[in-house]
Image: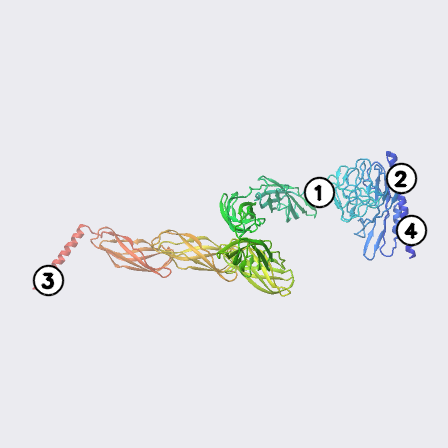
Amino acid sequence: METPMNRSTVFTLLIGLLVIQGSVAGVVGNDANASANGTNATTEESSVTEHPTEDNGSVDMEAIMNSATNNSSEPRSESDNSSNGTSETTTASETTTTEEESTTTETATTTTPTETTTESTTQSETTTETTTTTPTETESSDSTRQTEDSESESSTTGGETSTTTTDGQSGGNGAATQPSGQSESQSPEAGGAQSQPTGQAAAGADSTSAQTASTAGSQGGSAAQAGAERSSGGQAGSAQAGGAQAGGAQTGGAPSGAAPSGAGGQAGTGAQTGGSQAGAGAQAGGTQAGGAQAGGNGAQTASPDAEFNVTGVDDSVAVGGSGTVAVTIENTGEDATDAVVDFQSPSGDLLFGQSPTTSRYVGEWDEGETRTIEVTMQATPSADTAEYPVRATVSYEDDDGNAAQSAPLTFGVTPGGEQSFSLGSVDGDLSVGDSGTITGTITNEGPETATDAVLTVGPNASRDVIPRQTQVVLGTLDPDESEGFELPVIVDSEAEPGLRQLPLTVQYYDDDGNPMQSSTLNARVEIDEERDDFAIESVEPAVEAGEEGTLSVTLTNTGGNVTDATVSTQSLSGGILFGQSANATRFVEDWDAGDTRTFEYDVRAAEGATGATYPLQTSISYDDSDGDQGQAGPLAFGVTPGESVDDFSVVETTSNVQVGDEGPISVTLENTGANASEATVSLQSLTGDITFGRTANATQFVGDWPAGAQRTITFNATASNTTDVQSYPFQASVSYSDGDGDTARGGPFTIGVTPQPEQAFDLDNAASTLRVGDEGNVTAQITNEGPQDVQNAVVQLVTQGENINPQETEFAVGNLPAGETANVSFPVEVTDSAEAGQRQFSFVVEYDNQNGDPRRSGTLDTQVPIEPQRDEFTIEPANASVGAGSSETMTLNVTNNRDSVVRNVNAKAFVDAPLSISSDEAYISRLGPGETKQIAFDVSAGGDASEGQYPLSVDFQYDTADGESKLSQTYEVPVETTASEGGGLFSSLGLTIGLVALLVVIGVGWVWSRR
């Protein structure tokens, strides 16, 4: 232990020598400066460098000796370009190794120049030395992690601690005095540095790379005070030096001040603005540079390569409403990473929700790429229909990992006219304690259509007028369209007669499908005085939402004596029930005038009834003193259940039900309370568009439900064909037994369920080869428009009409994924009685949905043409002439003029005199569409046949492609008859003479035979 003590003694002596040396150098330098300029001298206290030891207090004597040797040669600061002399103080350095933390701390020798042109005068008589350790990172060949400990010295004057600082500039500007706790430094008037309160940094900066400042005016910033306390992450902000703005730098826990003498490091974490590196001259007292900037305001300006342009703006914001603003921005600069677009609206009339700013994350954004960013904006009712400026700024990292930012991109957003409604023709026959109806008319004043409008009673309605229903459906209202309403109400029995105001609002969807709400429309109604012999004195409910409790109603007989009175109390809504009933009765045998009776009922409040007032009424039937029956009431009053605490919460809701189909709705709930048993979950549809079969409620048993556990319950729901693709309200609730075995309820929880669009199919490219009297095909393409895949699809032709006979009515497609297309074809016969022209054909797709349930699409209609009828065959004569008195073989070309093949074609020919035919039939086995074959008949012409054309008739009996036998029409073929060779008059005369001679011979023979 003796050696460490000796080393400590040596170390103390060396430190004392260094302090004396720095003090003498400071005094000499200041005296010389004061002599040259005729001003007061500034006394500089040199800082003391502390060398802590971690283990046994041993000190590296060789390092200390080297430090002492280095004091003999003090380097000058590169920033000292002044013509005036500068005094310097040097702090010895030492390297200390800590074995426990395995870290090496190396302190470097730093030089702090003190300009002789800057003078600071202190009035202190007592000097207090304060040691502050400041780690400073410097270069080392052996270690990448180096720290530097430096000490600063502060002076106390008249009980107040002050610090003498010398700015690193030449000229007349020194560091200004800062109040305690203030981090922003200001440039003082010319004439010397002002004193600073203890612990204040003129410009705080991260000391990880302190750098000496440049010469006069070139760099802004103020040196941190000597002897300043370690900064705890305070903000060093916007120091003014020599007319230059000093950029604020976050100190982040780094020490401000106490820079070691002679150190010339980089100013850290100071924001760079205006392109100049900011620094601060570290003075001989060990002050540290603060991250200041020349010529800037501390905020990051636009990077030179950050170039973005707004190429398009699409907005749909109305005054008094909200809408979407889509801004298209093109990156015309460099590639960007982790890009974020910040939006700012300077006007309070155009906001992003409730804020003037919002941001959108873009991510990767390459040069030349265009992005469209959508934000939701809201125009206040006081906004004008004028263009409002909106600014967008893009912040990102470039390819080198540097933060960059674009210049503000300004574009305009013009709100549309405010949607408004008016209330008119308000009327109501109301009296105290009685039921009535408020009527009126709502008019859409435009400018847009209000879809699914609902008139709603506002939450701040008078408790004297209790609505029996809080909403009235108005439907869709076009601009300038009006709709009447009737609102049933009950007037409280304790209400005072007079005028009342009922706030009404119109809730609707705008053209973009956004839910909107109008401004308040106040309906003024008159309440007349009470007309009953009984009055409600008080109503005291003791029931919470979803729980059972009691209801006490106190009535007073304000008329005469009555007997056999029956008090009937009725709930006008499902919010309050008497057990399972909406009615309850009590009997009073004698009820004298002025007497008061209190009736207590066991009631149950509906789940979700918290904060709502539910209407009830009481009626009294009795016998008066004359024995006549009387009736009083109904007397109306309202009951507001107390708030209940839920032990369950909704985690997630999913839906896979389609419009016009059924599917699952899954609700995930979490038990946020204690363990529950015999739990059941109920889901109630608040609309008739989505139901559970034929009911609006469904319940499933869960059983034990530990605290903190989640359960997913799935219900099979059905959406009607008229259901829209929008969110529909449902209420989920939990019934269970708590740890005491008591029945409890959780909820109800209102959730939204959005059905998927209805399964749709599309029919395209319909065509046909149909012709009157012929058979053809109808073809089309069927596309599954989704949203789900279908299985076992079959397309049916459902057209049924006269003269149209489909040969096949079904075409099997099979599985058809969403977006896929299939071709279908149906053979159809058109009778001879049909008319040519356009005919409509209807198709239906039958398929199985994802649950395997059979489904049927709607009718898909299309029109196809039916061509006029044409001959089945075309007949052309190949050889059709015969001489008079001779025979010839007639040859005919027969062509199939149909679109299908025919078989077993039997031709039959007919002629009239002077033609005759010896073979009148011909046969063709097969004749394809457009095919031609020849048939022949033997035809003779009489000898007396005149030259000319004579008809040969022929028809055909044949079989169609489907085996049906048909008979064609009759075709007429002209036969040319010519005179025989050697004919003329003599030829005819010779024939006549021959015939006469033959007859004479026959006659003579007959006579001869008779003899």
- On the image, numbered disc 2 is attached to which residue? 28
Query: How busy is the neighbourhood of tag 2: few (under 14 within 10 Å), some, or many (20 plus)?
Result: some
Mark 3 lies on a secondary structure that is helix
The label nearer to you, 4 versus 3, is 4
C-alpha gap between disc 4 and disc 3: 189 Å
The label nearer to you, 2 versus 3, is 2
Q: Amino acid at mark 4?
A: Val
**The one of 682 and 855 positioned closer to us in this rendering:** 682
- On the image, numbered disc 1 is attached to which residue? 299
The mark nearer the N terminus, 2 or 3, is 2
Q: Amino acid at mark 1?
A: Ala
Mark 4 lies on a secondary structure that is helix
Q: Amino acid at mark 2?
A: Val
C-alpha gap between disc 2 and disc 3: 190 Å
C-alpha gap between disc 1 and disc 2: 42 Å
Residue 249's image quarter? top right
Residue 237's image quarter? top right
The label nearer to you, 1 versus 3, is 1
Residue 247's image quarter? top right
Mark 1 lies on a secondary structure that is loop
The mark nearer the N terminus, 1 or 2, is 2
The mark nearer the N terminus, 4 or 3, is 4
Q: Amino acid at mark 3?
A: Trp
In this rendering, position of residue 65 left or right of residue 103? right
**The one of 237 and 822 positioned closer to us in this rendering:** 237
The label nearer to you, 4 versus 1, is 1
- On the image, numbered disc 4 is attached to which residue? 10
